[in-house]
Amino acid sequence: MGTPVWAAKPKKGGHFRLGVASGASTDSLDPGQLPSTAPQVVHMQLRNCLVELDYKYRPIPELAESWEPSKDAAKWIFKLRKGVEFHNG
């Protein structure tokens, strides 16, 4: 029997290949324009969300450790985990 994968040391570098049906030459990595499954799947490999959904579709923290609406519910305030920062690309 081989060594379990969880016991292996991480390998840095290399290539990540992902095959997804339904891709098109017009697909974009613009998070505001994810028109089909293919760019959505690729996008999920490249970024993190402030909040994710668990298996029962309940919000759970990812980059945000907490969040709450403003008093007038016009805005949401997210508190980021320590060490997380936004960047412009």
Image: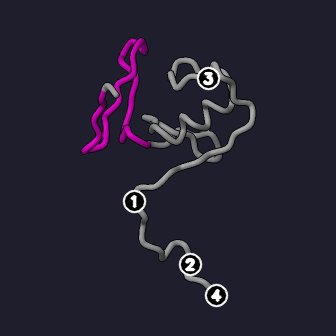
Near mark 2 (Cα within 10 A), the count class, few <14, some 14-19 or many ≥20, is few
Quickly name the residue at label 2: 4
Circles 1 and 2: CB atoms closer than 8 Å: no
> Of discs 1 and 4, which sits in the foreground?
1
Q: Earlier in the sequence, mark 3 or mark 2?
A: 2
Quickly name the residue at label 3: 27
Q: Earlier in the sequence, mark 1 or mark 2?
A: 2
Cα separation, mark 1 vs mark 2, equals 19 Å
Q: Earlier in the sequence, mark 1 or mark 4?
A: 4
Q: Secondary structure at mark 4?
A: loop
Quickly name the residue at label 4: 1
Give the amino acid at mark 1: Lys
Check the image and name the residue furthest to the left.
83
Q: Secondary structure at mark 1?
A: loop
Circles 3 and 2: CB atoms closer than 8 Å: no
- Range shown magenta: 62-87
Give the amino acid at mark 3: Asp
Give the amino acid at mark 4: Met
Residue 81 lies, in percent from the top left, at 31, 42
Task: Name which residue lies at 50% across and 51% down.
Answer: 15
Task: Name which residue lies at 34% across and 25% down.
Answer: 77
Give the amino acid at mark 2: Pro
